[in-house]
Image (cartoon, rainbow, N blue to C red):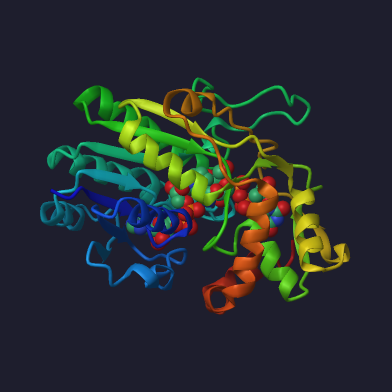
Amino acid sequence: MNVVVIVTGGAGFIGSNFIFHMLASHEDYRIVCLDKLTYAGNLSTLKSVMDRPNFRFVRLDICDRCGVERLFEEEKPDIVVNFAAESHVDRSIENPSVFLQTNIVGAGVLMDACRKYGVRRFHQVSTDEVYGDLPLNRPDLFFTEDTPIHASSPYSSSKAGADLLAMAYYRTYGLPVTISRCSNNYGPYHFPEKLIPLMIVNCLYDRPLPVYGEGINVRDWLYVEDHCKAIDLVIHRGRVGEVYNIGGHNEMRNIDIVKLICRELGKPESLITYVTDRKGHDLRYAIDPAKILRELGWLPETRFEDGIRKTIRWYLEHRDWWEEIISGEYQTYYERMYANR
Ligand code: NAD
Ligand code: DAU
């Protein structure tokens, strides 16, 4: 019988790339996408797979217990991969409550349904941000799976909450969970409120490029396809009850990313505008991926120089996708966040 995988948040950035990866590499699997279609979810992203016989899209909130149970009853999933989340740190600083609801309560609803329907794997897609940050002057330090949880923002603490809940469900009920904690992703279908797509889009309109603080904060960038391949490995071969860090040792300062995007697009660095820093801004993230390499043989395949060019090209060739997004609620968001910053 076909394996049934429910992918929550599959109309968002990483979830959609994961669906494309799964449909391409497991042709006999049935993939069911459950997504609420918040501002960050886009049905147009899934256009190319919508008519596949082994794909189904269901608009649903992961906090809707009855709806979730109905779907599990219908589909009898083997595996559930939870990408659904409020994912933007700046929005969490502005209004934390929806983060607690979706990221913690919603994850709990999914885990209850997994228990009830005997799902053989619940995978929680988490983030390196649960570890807090590392100092800028200690390049020798990295996050390992044993680094204590020390989240800084409402977003990251809500993700940490879901991780704790998943581990508690494993220990208390024996729910077969795995957790992955990945570093910053980039690639196609990345919502243009996040650093890389925001800078590409603003460059294309010759708009100011708002760099927070001095631009010296460091993020560890991974091409989204590499993240998807890592999750595929973890759900099939990862050990139950374990956390796997995912990252490719590709640390870069924000300002260097922004300058690189300017260069690639032939835009002047004079567009760069330093703006008020993010509250509680994490200084540096850096993943030690030794465990996933050792246990599952995962290594990133896309070098940053190639991935960023591919990404920029994708945004140039898919203007219709992001122009539609930035014509709606995004305008109000942008004004609110950046007008007097
Ligand atoms: P995203 O914001 O692009 O997409 C989130 C998706 O979840 C959207 O389609 C949205 O409609 C859906 N969603 C939100 N609330 C929902 C709800 N209550 N019920 C059902 N669907 C809901 O996010 P992303 O960047 O693709 O991140 C996906 C996951 O990966 C998140 O859990 C995030 O914490 C994690 N993560 C992201 C990164 C990154 O760099 N983007 C890195 C590591 C981990
Ligand atoms: O590390 C994984 C995390 O990466 C994920 O868990 C989050 O869901 C994802 O949003 C991302 O969080 P960041 O806060 O690191 O990503 P963001 O793109 O918002 O910001 C990256 C860096 O760029 C950060 O240091 C803040 C800075 N920044 C961001 C924006 C949007 C700017 O300087 N200017 C901006 O306009």
Say above or below: 266 vs 122: below
Residue 160 appears in view: no
Q: Does residue 153 appear left or right of residue 179 in this picture?
A: right
The residue positioned 41% from the left and 41% from the top of the image is 231
Residue 69 pos. (x, y %)? 16, 52
Q: Quadrant of residue 38?
A: bottom left
In this rendered view, identify the residue nearer to me: 253 or 153: 253
Q: Give residue 89's position: percent from left, percent from top.
A: 57, 50
Q: Quick one: 303 or 111, which is closer to the camera?
A: 303
Camera-side residue of 276 and 132:
132
Q: Residue at x 66, y 64 (%)?
A: 312
Label total for image: 0
Whether residue 270 sits left or right of residue 200 in the image: it is right
Whether residue 51 is visible, yes or no, is yes
- Residue shown at 42% from the left, 51% from the top: 85
The residue shown at (16%, 51%) is 72
Is 10 above or below relative to 239? below
Q: Image quadrant for the C terminus?
A: bottom right
Furthest residue to the top?
146
Residue 264 in percent (x, y) is at 77, 63
User: Residue 263 location, x and y as percent?
Assistant: 81, 61
Quarter of the view holding residue 216:
top right
Asked whether 5 or 301 is in front, the reply is 301
